[in-house]
Image (cartoon, rainbow, N blue to C red):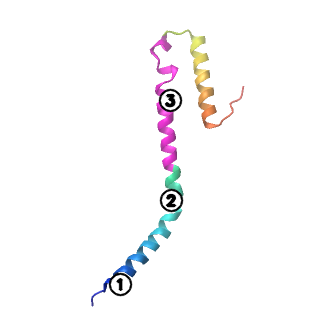
Amino acid sequence: MSLSATDLLEIRSIFKDELRKELEPIKGDLEALSNDVKELYEMIASLQHSAVTDPKFKRLSIEKKLLALNAELLEAARQVGITLPR
């Protein structure tokens, strides 16, 4: 028994429809994960340009280091929409 071209097209169509139905629930999850990865890359990039990685930071007084760290923390919290207690 051999399948005709029409039979093969119908099988292909059914298979594609079923595959779409199966993949639809994870489509949103995949998109969310992709967005999370992009956010992480952006956070890493911003950390690489932060005051903490500046060679001058090591020479600052403890008070100035704390002020710089506080500013970095407040900026990071602002970027993700978190309000820190004062």
Tell me the SS state at disc 3: helix
The part of the chain drawn in magenta is 33-58
Residue 78: percent from left, percent from top: 63, 32
Sequence-first tag of 3 and 1 = 1
| Residue 32 higher or lower than 9, as above or below | above
Tell me the SS state at disc 1: helix
Report the disc number at residue 46: 3
Residue 23: percent from left, percent from top: 48, 64
| View extreme (right): residue | 86
Tell me the SS state at disc 2: helix
| Residue that appears at 71% across and 29% down | 85
Amino acid of disc 1: Thr
Amino acid of disc 2: Lys
Q: From mark 3 to mark 1, how far is it between C-alphas?
A: 56 Å
Amino acid of disc 3: Ser
Report the disc number at residue 6: 1
Quadrant location of the N terminus?
Answer: bottom left
Quadrant location of the C terminus?
Answer: top right
Report the disc number at residue 51: none
Mark 2: few/some/many CA within 10 Å (<14, 14-19, 20+): few
| Residue that appears at 47% across and 17% down | 54
